[in-house]
Amino acid sequence: MSDAPAVRVEEVNVSYGDLQVLWDVSMELTEDDRVVALIGPNGAGKTTLLKTLSGLLAVDSGRIDLFGRDATALSPDRIVDLGFVHVPEERNLFTEMTVVENLEMGAFRHRDEFEATLGEVFELFPILEERHDQHAGTLSGGEQQMLAIGRGLMAQPTVLALDELSVGLAPKLVARVFEKVEEISEETTVLLTEQHVHEALGLADRAYLLENGRITLEDSADALLESDRVTEAYLRD
């Protein structure tokens, strides 16, 4: 593997119009990381950071390197080409298209390897194979989440960024989705934002705490689980 981090964010500032959302954010992921969690309250800027890494939002200042290349001003399609794939909270499925057609959309950069990658996704998510000719809009919430992840995997990412996986899912389904993320992380580095802080930290190797648009803590996931600050703010019943 390259010595360069897979993702390096250096003092990035991002605004929506006149409203600054991210302040001097710096973080790193290596290809040796399995899961890195980005935790924090609603409105902290987690989704904004993923959209910025994906090229959907422009930076005001700072730099983003992906796989050793300056990606600060690259378009979203070029960022996918590099190997960084973002699965948004909204899922953005094509609801009138079938499961397979949605997966085909994810593989548009790797059509020659479609069948092999499709087989891997079906092995990971057997329910998608069962529902292969069903319209995405008729799937359950958990099935739609699996389809969104599967579509991201069809792009053969080196880093898969998953935004708020558990939103709208019943607790039992949340547990199943996290199990699948653990399987994915055996082959692909995962950057995970999540409101279920305990579950996210339990899965992650390392974690960053983002509050009010700033990284306020970074450490091993175990250390953050034991942190009084994190416990008081996010892990109390």
Image: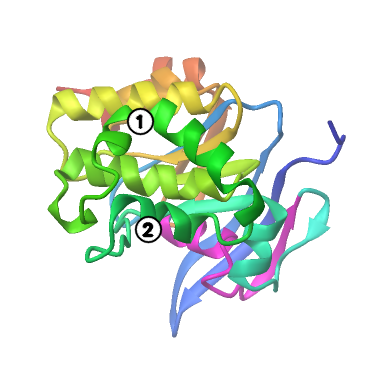
How far from the left and from the top, in percent, is residue 159? 61, 42
Number of residues whose C-alpha sits closer than 10 Å to that of mark 1, classed few (under 14), some (14–19) or many (20 or more): some
How far from the left and from the top, in percent, is residue 153? 51, 43
156 sits to left or right of 180: right
Q: How many marks?
A: 2
Q: Nearer the viewer, residue 141 or 213?
A: 141
42 sits to left or right of 184: left
Q: Are marks 1 and 2 in contact (CB under 8 Å)?
A: no
Q: Is residue 123 visible?
A: yes
Q: Quadrant of the N terminus?
A: top right
Label of residue 65 in the image: none
Does label 1 or label 2 sit earlier along the sequence?
Answer: 2
Q: Quadrant of the C terminus?
A: top left
How far from the left and from the top, in percent, is residue 106? 49, 56
Q: Is residue 229 visible?
A: no
137 sits to left or right of 3: left
121 sits to left or right of 146: right
Magenta stretch contains residue 52: yes
Task: Tell me where the magenta segment starts and ends, as one range.
Answer: 47-66
Magenta stretch contains residue 187: no
Q: CA distance from mark 1 to mark 2?
A: 16 Å
The residue singled out by tag 2 in the image is: 101
**Amino acid type for the residue under numbered disc 1:** Phe
